[in-house]
Image (cartoon, helix red, strand yellow):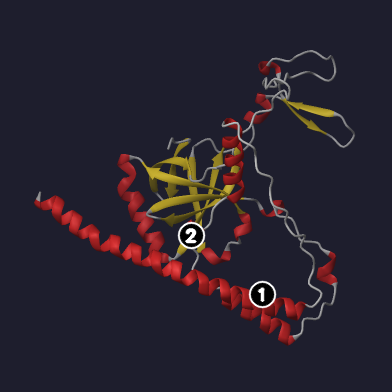
């Protein structure tokens, strides 16, 4: 990984120099826009809508459009006077229970690595934060924008999660929220039964991006000059006419799926146990060698 920012965590009078890394990456298949007939790449030019001339990047400024349609042009000098911190600090503002922060606020996750001289205070703050069961609420300026963020610990490393501001969260204003919709006790009980039947510990490794895998197969088939198989038709989902019957059938299907999946999970767990048993033996063999 390559660091994208250098700065410091400011915690009281303690300063911890750190490097910032993107904690996530998109695994989408990348495409270019091309000419259908010959595969040539499509290029775009920056053209002014007023005089029709191509504009070099050095002559481009930022414009804010008013409701009247008039454009207000802002230059680099206009941005220089704005109150944006340039000290490259992650300022700790407070500590709070993690459950008090709605996940809807989170925007992007980053890892923080300490510089050599900051390793000890980094570990000290990390251990103290982890034992407290809380997260640090911080303020940081990244990419010319100031954000609220949280610091939490994951796998022994600080994770900085930038947050949206409160006025950036939309209010769910939907008509059904004002309707008086009656849910019968037996329907609620059956829905709870379905949840219980489908309940299990979350393991992210059990899931995969089926669309990306299928798309990669299409590309490979094209490269090999093979026929691309047509996708199977999916049955259109319709609202259940009899909600109770649909819930009951869902519970039965979930039970069957769970019973079928348990042997596979047991086999997988047994495989892990055997590997764990072998590991000490291998370490011992290496030591004696």
Q: Is residue 186 left or right of residue 201?
A: right
Name the residue that disc number 2 marks. 135
Q: Residue at x 86, y 29 (%)?
A: 70
Q: Mark 2, residues whose alpha carbon is within 10 Å: few (<14), some, or many (≥20)?
A: many
Q: Is residue 26 left or right of residue 153?
A: right
Q: Residue at x 38, y 55 (%)?
A: 126
Q: Among all residues in the image, which is located at the extreme right? A: 68
Q: Is residue 282 left or right of residue 207?
A: left
Q: Looking at the image, is mark 1 or mark 2 nearer the viewer?
A: 1
Q: Which mark is residue 162?
A: none
Q: Secondary structure at mark 1?
A: helix
Name the spot of residue 202 as percent of width and height, x first.
50, 65
Q: Is residue 186 above or below residue 65?
A: below
Q: Is residue 261 left or right of residue 106?
A: left
Can the viewer see residue 198?
no
Q: Nearer the viewer, residue 214 or 228?
A: 228
Q: Nearer the viewer, residue 218 or 26?
A: 218
Q: Secondary structure at mark 2?
A: strand
Q: Residue at x 85, y 18 (%)?
A: 50
Name the residue that disc number 1 marks. 250
Q: Among all residues in the image, which is located at the extreme bottom? A: 185
Q: Residue at x 41, y 60 (%)?
A: 129
Name the spot of residue 14 as percent of width and height, x first.
38, 48
Q: Among all residues in the image, which is located at the extreme left? A: 288
Q: Quadrant of the N terminus?
A: top left
């Amino acid at each position: 990984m390559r660091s994208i920012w250098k700065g410091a965590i400011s915690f009281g009078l303690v300063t911890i120099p750190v490097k910032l890394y993107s904690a996530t990456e998109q695994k989408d298949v990348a495409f270019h826009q091309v000419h259908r007939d010959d595969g040539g790449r499509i290029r775009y030019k920056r053209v002014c809508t007023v005089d029709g001339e191509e504009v070099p990047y050095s002559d481009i400024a930022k414009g804010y459009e008013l409701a009247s349609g008039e454009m207000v042009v802002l230059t680099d000098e206009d941005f220089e006077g704005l109150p944006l911190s340039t000290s490259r600090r992650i300022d700790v503002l407070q500590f709070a229970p993690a459950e008090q922060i709605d996940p809807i606020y989170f925007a992007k996750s980053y890892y923080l690595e300490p510089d050599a001289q900051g390793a000890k205070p980094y570990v000290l703050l990390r251990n103290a934060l982890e034992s407290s069961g809380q997260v640090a609420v911080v303020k940081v300026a990244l990419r010319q924008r100031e954000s609220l963020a949280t610091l939490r610990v994951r796998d022994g490393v600080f994770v900085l999660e930038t947050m949206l501001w409160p006025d950036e969260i939309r209010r769910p204003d939907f008509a059904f929220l004002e309707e008086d919709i009656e849910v019968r006790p037996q329907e609620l009980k059956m829905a709870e039964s379905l949840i219980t039947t489908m309940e299990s510990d979350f393991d992210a490794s059990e899931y995969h991006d089926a669309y990306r895998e299928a798309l990669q197969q299409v590309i490979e088939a094209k490269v090999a000059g093979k026929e691309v198989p047509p996708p199977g038709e999916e049955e259109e989902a319709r609202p259940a006419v009899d909600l109770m019957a649909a819930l009951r059938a869902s519970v039965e299907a979930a039970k069957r799926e769970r019973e079928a999946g348990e042997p596979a999970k047991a086999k997988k767990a047994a495989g892990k146990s055997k590997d764990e048993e072998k590991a000490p033996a291998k370490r011992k063999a290496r030591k004696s060698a």
